[in-house]
Image (tube, rainbow, N blue to C red):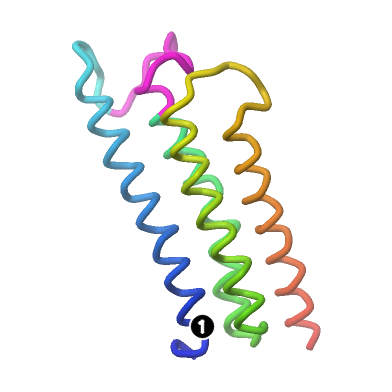
Amino acid sequence: MFLTYSISLWGLWLVGLTVVLQGIIAAVAHRRQSRYVPGKVDDNLSHDSFVFRSHRTFQNSLENLTPFLIPALLAMFVGVDPTTLSIIVWIFALSRLLHMCLYYAIATEKNPSPRSYFYGIGLLATLSLYIVTALGLLG
């Protein structure tokens, strides 16, 4: 199974690594403030603050990880076509990476912002994953 789904597994590895790096970046940004309380982001901060953006990027990735990871693993167990699964996983992984880069780079309250498009692509990948996994479960 691991060899069959190796491309998908590498994509999931990238997703996990992205989340870990986001956590490190958010922690470093938070601690570089002149005044900070460990574990609490100032409620007065907004998109003009990198501390806020790095925290929200990390939280957003955590919020999207479980709903994607569970059906991705289930898809492997039910035998979803490896090529289909790898395409979906890599679309999700790259969309999350681009979402992160844009969230770090662009301080805007505008919605939709450029990062929103990559959030949407990731969401479509997640919904596609649920569909192909359900079809795999139905046999």
User: What secondary structure is found at the residue carrying circle 1?
Assistant: loop
- At label 1, the amino acid type is Tyr
The residue lying at 39 percent from left, 31 percent from top is 54
Which residue, as the protein is rendered here, is positioned at the far top? 44
Q: Give residue 112's position: percent from left, percent from top.
A: 68, 27
Judge by depth and name the residue closer to the eye, 8 or 67. 8
Dominant secondary structure of the residues highlighted in magenta in the image = loop
From the viewer's perspective, is residue 99 above or below residue 17? Answer: above
The residue lying at 63 percent from left, 77 percent from top is 75
Judge by depth and name the residue closer to the eye, 73 or 83. 83
- Quadrant hosting residue 125: bottom right
33 vs 73, left or right, is left
87 vs 99, left or right, is right
79 vs 65, left or right, is right
From the viewer's perspective, is residue 43 above or below residue 121? Answer: above
- Residue position for label 1: 5
Judge by depth and name the residue closer to the eye, 64 or 103. 103
What residue span does the magenta drawing correspond to? 39-53
Q: Is residue 48 magenta?
A: yes
